[in-house]
């Protein structure tokens, strides 16, 4: 499939061919959902912690004698039913991450790219660069292009001036191509790929563009 190449000045810079094996798949919501869940669970800190009865700072002395008080028998005050006691089955530090095969993760990325392409929300940019590194200049350029909620993916190296100018703009994310991920693609309305990013993605999925299908796709 062909896509028009635009510039930051809203001009035309020719066309580029987008590989159908990357941008022309029929999107599978189940794969995309699994990948988003994988990402969100993986980034959870898992540092929540509640003290159990062995960790609370209370005396270990028996509250009162076993018999003769007319009350129920009790030991020390660290048990969960008393105020200041430990939490029964409380949360402990752990990893929330789930497993997802590498091939499935790669396939989910291709389906997310295809979903953006199908909805017409992919834009190919000539290059992501800023002459003066000023936020106001970039803001005016984005306004002409009607970019208000955008993820911009550049090549392996980002231009420092462009990143500096874009980082103060709300709902604008700039990532190198090695940082592209399904969650960030879906959370922004438009996906902007530079020509360098398109070339890097085609190189990354060279096996798919050459006609070789991953095992995960064959089973689906």
Image (spheres, rainbow, N blue to C red):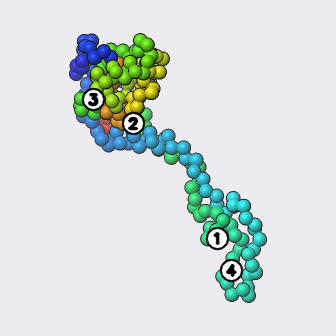
Residue 73 is marked as 4
Q: Are marks 1 and 3 in contact (CB under 8 Å)?
A: no
Q: Which residue is nearer to you in this view: 16 or 28?
A: 16
- The residue at 26%/14% (across/down) is 11
Tell me the element at label 3: loop
In the shown orientation, is residue 61 left or right of residue 52? Answer: right
As displayed, is residue 16 above or below residue 217? above
Question: Residue at the location (39% across, 32% down)?
Answer: 171
Neighbour tally class for label 1: few under 14, some 14-19, many 20 plus, Cα within 10 Å: few
Secondary structure found at label 1: loop
Q: Are marks 2 and 4 in contact (CB under 8 Å)?
A: no
> Which dot, 3 or 2, sits closer to the camera?
3
Query: What residue is drawn where x is 75% and y is 74%?
Result: 62
Q: Which residue is mark 1?
A: 82
* Residue 42 falls left or right of residue 103: right
Badge 4 vs badge 3, beta-carbon distance below 8 Å: no
Q: CA distance from mark 3 to mark 2?
A: 15 Å
């Amino acid at each position: 499939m062909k896509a028009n190449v635009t510039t930051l000045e809203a001009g035309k810079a020719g066309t580029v061919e987008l590989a159908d094996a990357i941008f022309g798949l029929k999107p599978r919501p189940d794969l995309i959902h699994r990948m988003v869940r994988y990402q969100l669970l993986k980034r959870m800190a898992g540092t929540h912690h509640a003290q159990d009865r062995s960790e609370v700072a209370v005396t270990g002395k028996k509250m009162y004698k076993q018999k003769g008080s007319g009350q129920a028998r009790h030991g020390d005050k660290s048990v969960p039913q008393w105020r200041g006691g430990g939490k029964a089955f409380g949360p402990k530090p752990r990893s929330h991450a789930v497993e997802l095969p590498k091939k499935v993760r790669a396939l989910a990325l291709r389906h997310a790219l295809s979903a953006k392409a199908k909805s017409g929300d992919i834009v190919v940019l000539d290059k992501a660069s800023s002459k003066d590194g000023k936020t106001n200049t970039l803001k005016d350029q984005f306004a002409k292009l009607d970019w208000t909620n955008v993820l911009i993916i550049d090549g392996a190296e980002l231009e420092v001036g462009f990143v500096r100018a874009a980082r103060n703009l709300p709902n604008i994310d700039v990532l190198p191509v090695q940082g592209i991920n399904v969650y960030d693609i879906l959370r922004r309305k438009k996906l902007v790929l530079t020509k360098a990013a398109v070339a890097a993605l085609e190189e990354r999925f060279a096996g798919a563009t050459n006609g070789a299908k991953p095992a995960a796709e064959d089973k689906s």
